[in-house]
Every structure is written in C-alpha cells, then in structure tokens.
Image: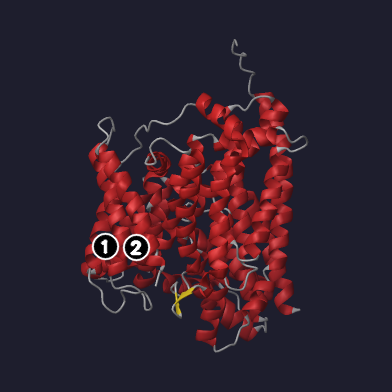
Amino acid sequence: MIVLLGVALVVVGFALRINPLLVVTIAGIVSALLGGLSPLHILEAFGSGFASSRSITLAFLVLPVIGLLERYGLQQRAKTLVSQAAGLTAGRLLLVYLFVRQLTAAFGLTSIGGTAQMVRPVIYPMAEGAVMRSHGRVPEPVTEAIKAHAAAADTIGVFFGEDCFVAIGSVLLITAYVDANYHLKLDALQVAIWAVPTAIAAFLIHGFRLLRLDARVAAMMADSPEQPASAQ
Amino acid sequence: MIGAEWIYWLCGGFFFIVGVQIAFDREHPKRWTNALFWCLLGASLCAGSFVAGPAGSPAALHPTIPSWLLGGAVIVTALIAGFGLTGAGTVRTTTEAEREASAARRRNLLFVPALTIPAVTVLIAIEGGRLSIGGHPLLVAGTQTLVGLGVATIAALVVGWALLRPRNPAVAFTEGRRLLESIGWAALLPQMLSTLGLLFTQAGVGTQVGVIVHHIVPEHSRVLAVIVYALGMAGFTLIMGNAFAAFPIMTAAVGWPILVQQMGAHPAPLFAIGMLAGFCGTLCTPMAANFNLVPPALLEMRDKYGQIKVQIPTAILLLAVNVCFMMIFPFA
C-alpha cells in the first residue's frame, strides 16, 4: 500500500504548482524505492523509459520550418485570409477544424494536425482573424480563450477520431491485452466500430460548445473596455 | 534500411544545434545551464538508439551504451530544468510590420511548405512500405509514419528555403530555437511521464489500485459495476496521464471478471467504450503533458492550465455519455 505514496506525491506536487519535471522525477524515484527497486535498476528504468518513448518528442522536429514560415508572415496571412471570409466566426472555424481533425484521424491520418504544425501557425491565427473581422479588436483575455479553444479542438478531435481506426495504438492495445490474457480472438475492427457512437457524441457535445464560443467572445468584448484608437 | 532511429538522430541534432546556439548567445539570461539542457537532451535522443530497449528495437541485441548511463543523463537534464535553471532568451526575429509586408507580398505561397508536411507524411505513411532498393524494402517495417514525418520536415524545409530565399538559410534553426525555447522544459515532460508510468508499474502501483478497486466493486449490480469501470478508467488515467496504463488494471479488476464473466457483457463494445472513458480522464490532467501542457506552452498562453479548463466540461459530459453507452451496447 505504501507505494501509493508516489501517486500522492504527484498529486500534491501538481497542486502546489512545483515544477512538474521535478515532481515527476522525484515521484518516480520515491515510488521505485518504496517498491523495492535498487538504485541501479531505477537508473536503468529512466534510461530505457526515455529511449522507448522518444517518438513523442519527434513532434518538435517541425519547429524550424514553422519558425521560418512565421518569420515571413504565415500567421498574418492566415489572419488576412479569414478576415475576408464573411460569416466565418471563430466558433464556426474551430467547429470545421474539429470535424476535419476527427474525420482524418478516423482514417488513421493523425499526423495531419497537431499544435506545432497546424494550430499555432494556421488555425489559431485564423480564429483570431475571425474575431478581428467581427469585432475589430482582440483584447488579451479573448486571445487566451481563442488559444485554449484552438488547442482543445485539436486534442478532442484527434482523441475521439483515432479510436475509430483499426490500426491505432489504443485499439491494438485492447486486442493485444485481451487476447494475451483472456484467450479471446477480439476483432480490431469490432473494437474500432464501437468507438463510433462516442466519437459522434464527442462531436455533438464539443461542437455545441464551440458554437457558443462566439457568444462568449461577444460577452468578453462587452466586459473589456475599448482601448483608445492609436493615432495614425 | 531507413528506420525511426535516423529520425531520432535528426531531432537530437536539432536540439543539439539549439544548445550550441544558446552557448554562443552572450545575452542569454541563463546561458550555460540552458545550453547544457538542450545539448544533453539532444545527445540523449541520439544515445537512445544504442541502449538495451524493448525487444525488436535495433539495439536490443547489441546495446553499446549502458541504460543506467542514459538514465543518469536524463535525470540530470530533468533536474537542471526542475530547479528552474532554464528559461527562454530573446531571439531576434522579424517585426509585426515586416511580417505584414511579407505576408502581403507572398500571399498563399506561405502555406505551401506548411502543407508539404502533412502531405508528404501521409504519402510515406501509406505508400512508404512499397519502396524498395534491389528487392530489399527501403524502410524498416512499422516505422513508416515516423520516417514520413522526418522526410516531410526536410522536404518542407527545402521547399521553404526555395520559396522564401532567406539570405542565411540557418535562420530556420534560429527561428526553430525561438519556438523550442518557448516550450522549454515542457519538451522533456512527456517522456518523463512515460518513464514515471513505467516505474509505477514496476513498483506495483497498478496492482495496489487493482486490489483497492476489487474491494469496493459491487458484485451483483450491473449499473454500479459499469460506473466503477468507467469512472475507474477516467480516474486512474487522471493520475497516470495515460489511458493505456489504466486499461490493463481496471480490466483485470472489474472489466473482465465481473462485467464479462459474471454479467455476460460483450467484450468488443465494453473495452472500446472503457478506453474512451479513460480518454475523458486524459482531457483533464496535466499528467498528459504532450496533449495538455505542451500546446499552451507552444501557443505562449499565460495560463498553462487554460486548455485543460476548456476541456473539462466536454470531458465530464462525454464521460456521462460513455457510462450510458456502456450500460446499453455491451448488453444488447
């Protein structure tokens, strides 16, 4: 029972807003020691754990390209493009992105979106451009809300889309675990198909919230005082 | 054969370049510790190819670097950042006005390199398996998507250089450094959390949670058993940051023995929905750093938990929907 102290450390550390990297490292070492692992074994676990999880970090490989494009005005172009499209609001734009992200992920194309390659350079500037078009200004709290919603639409879209694809990690984990432990022959396609109802529910729930985002932005506009127009 | 390892070296090389750039930046507020952080991280990414890994990895049979050494380097890297010795410097970039002017001149041409990335990635992910040289496959089986991402990045960089013609091509790495430094220590967090999950498992945390769940789970109420399974998946994912870690534990404790064996639930819908209930937990936890903490860092949000706050209402509603689905579909 005492190994659960490691879990408690994580919860307390995050709650106290101590640097998560420090919390996680200490909690890992403490739980391993409580679980009776030797110091050498712990070092080895950190080494092999790092080595086998490197694929997560590859998401940052695109940063030089994105940075180069930003230098030459990619975000500004995305804003301009949207500010010309009448009727396109931030909420509706993110709704379309949520739909595209879910649908492509459902066909296994999870690498199409992502924060580094899609949300920061294109989707978030477009959403902000849409706010700019309808309100003429984007105060700081609205920027924060738009950023948060753009990132959330990306994550929710990929989560509840990818599970409808047969050859994705989570589906394969289910079939591999169940087949190995309970001697079943679980069909991956069956597992993927049963993810569809939740995918539809996710789109309806989050899509509805995105459509209400426009009203929330309007309310935030009313709350934040108009800044004096700068002399041109 | 080209495999994922090549792409890890590419990424490690990029981090290393960032570290060296910082070492030469005299105005950087935390110059040396920051340079050390990125150089160590870059070197560790490359070194990972040469330690004993899981079966099937190229170095599994002939490890040339002991994994305790890599583990030590990783802990040092984590502690440098953990004690607040890293922080972003200021990278000289274009002004807002220069960007507006450039955007007005180059228009939609700017999207071409950005769209090259997904296009090439998907192309190689789908068709890459067919490439061969002299009858031997060009890509290591199962690594097409990662290799695709690596090749696509290089392709997009070349397209970007050709279209934008920067006076100094190395400016791409300076700009990359600007973005990477805004992510900062959060870049290492996802991998550390994955290691934490590994340590939790080896220390027996999962087994203990399983024992506790087994004590509180009702034997004969289908409704309560479904609720315990779904909420347990979400709750345990909240703690571990990963539904994959929660699945074996909750399934061994409740899903299989009680719901399938005792109550006759169909496995496919039960486990599919169970995993998705876990995903609702992922939406709410800072432990899922790569999904919930890295994006706010990359978007330079003031509130690092801003994205999680947006996701929580959707996650709660969706969890309720999943509980309902789980009461109906596996028993239909």
Question: Given the image, on which type of amino acid does mark 1 rest?
Answer: Gly
* Of the pair A111 and B71, the residue shown nearer to us: A111
Evaluate if marks 2 and 1 touch, with contact meaning CB atoms under 8 Å apart: yes
- Look at the image and tell me in which quarter the C terminus of chain A lies: top right
Residue B249: give x, y in percent of width and height: 49, 73
Query: Which residue is found at the position 24% from the left and 53% from the top?
Result: B76
Q: Chain of mark 2?
A: A
**Please, is residue A115 above or below residue A68 in the view?**
below
Q: x and y percent of residue A49 in the render?
A: 35, 66
Look at the image and tell me in which quarter the N terminus of chain A lies.
Answer: bottom left
The circle drawn on residue A50 is: 2
* Along the viewing direction, whichever of B279 and B141 lies nearer the viewer: B141
Give neighbour class at mark 1: few <14, some 14-19, many 20+ (Cα, 10 Å): many
B220 or B243, which lies in front? B243
User: Is B87 placed above or below A56 here?
Assistant: above
Q: Secondary structure at mark 2?
A: helix
Q: Position of residue A176 (x, y in %)?
A: 52, 80
